[in-house]
Image (cartoon, rainbow, N blue to C red):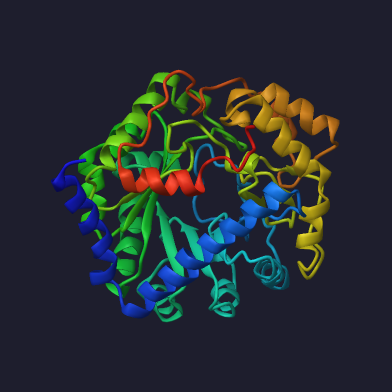
Amino acid sequence: MTRREYAANAKAALRIFTECPPRIVWKFMYNFGWKSMRNIRRFEKRQAGGKSFFPAFVMISVTENCNLACSGCWVSGGGKKSLSPQQLDGIIRSSKAKGSCFFGILGGEPLMYKGLLDVLEKHPDCYFQLFTNGILLTEEVAMRLRKMGNVTPLISIEGLQEESDARRGKNNVFERTLAGVRACRKAGLIFGAAASICKSNYHDLVNREYIERIAKEGAHYLWYYLYRPVGALPNAANALDKEEVLAFRRFVSEQRKDAPLFIIETYWDDKGNALCPGATGMSHHISPSGALEFCPPIQMAKEFLNEEGSNLAELFENSHFLADFRKMTAESSRGCILLENPQKLRAFLEQHGAIDTTSRRTVWEEYQKMTPLAGHNLPGNEIPEANPLYRFVKKRYFFGFGAYG
């Protein structure tokens, strides 16, 4: 890296310290940074020592309710399932007892979940990443998050004006989402923008102009995902092909050298080898029905929370289904089995008697229609991280935890 590139990285980091109140910065550095680092070490030791399993991080979808209708989304349109506040609180308490204090809060649209912030506010010693489309992220909500200090909104932007409306099933979505972005900036929050990259939004979002635009709007990080066509209205033709995935990986690696914000993805390690957070055991998902799922898009499960969410640790420790799932996926590919080998996934789910956890009850039929698509596993075309900072972080925290031998 050049001196200019090092200076750009330092400037991106300093934005957090100069644009956000000290209390928010402290919560981020301690609740998220320091505690997560300690938790990863505990998780690594448990894995290496063959001790009782508990994931490093828990992703929680609190509700199926949503105010948009996005193409390719796995959440049931019009679904009404939601965790109870008691279950949500129980999940957090059970995780804290295992040393895990960082949570992804998803939906549906989580801000449609009544009492969400009341529950999160009860846990000032935790840190929460709120996955939201931003439409309900008003200045009032943003100011409450500022007061709490332990929530980072991650605002989904699936394209510019035309693409946002087409993908998300409503009108004027882009500008309404930007209103949420600007509310976060006004409140001085640490926040990010997310994007699920597919063919139809690739040129909108995978370019330097968009990175600089979203940084000027105040975002401190940009989280890129690969589009997974699932749910009741999948659009497999919109998924990236192998060459597009490779170009996307090359773009991300290059832009990390001097981007004005942090660029995040969880698909590749420091050497450019693919990995799956579920296969490593680093993260699993809890659905609005209380089901323990391998990951958010795979909505089939065997175990369910009790009414208080107090049996979470016991379920993770004793789940042969999730243990077999981790082993099967790690042995199949370093990539995404849902994309690369849906036939093997179906056979595994059928063998274990997994059940549909959604309101729509059509997941099995949806999986039967799926055909293989390109994933992020690119053997022979690995692109190592070019930025020393990202290379160091990934080497420490995204190295597979022994899942791949």
The location of residue 307, given as percent across then percent down, is 80, 68
Q: Quadrant of residue 218?
A: bottom left
Residue 76, image x, y percentages = 63, 46
Query: In the rendered view, would you say 374 is above or below 155?
Result: above
Can you say which quadrant of the picture contains the C terminus? top right
Q: Is residue 113 visible?
A: yes
Toward the viewer: 74 or 58?
Answer: 58
Q: Residue at x 42, y 25 (%)?
A: 382
Percent across and percent down for residue 131 are 49, 57
Give the residue at x 49% y 20%: 379
Relative side of 207 to 87, left or right: left
Vertical position of residue 327 compared to residue 145: above or below: above
Rendered view: 16 above or below 21: above
**Is residue 307 shown left or right of residue 102?**
right
Q: Quadrant of the N terminus?
A: top left
Q: Quadrant of residue 21?
A: bottom left
In front of the other: 56 or 156: 56
Q: Is residue 285 left or right of residue 214?
A: right
Q: Residue at x 43, y 76 (%)?
A: 149
- Of the pair 137 and 299, the residue shown nearer to us: 299
Instruction: Classify residue 309 as left or right of residue 182.
Output: right
The x, y position of residue 164, in whole percent, is: 37, 44
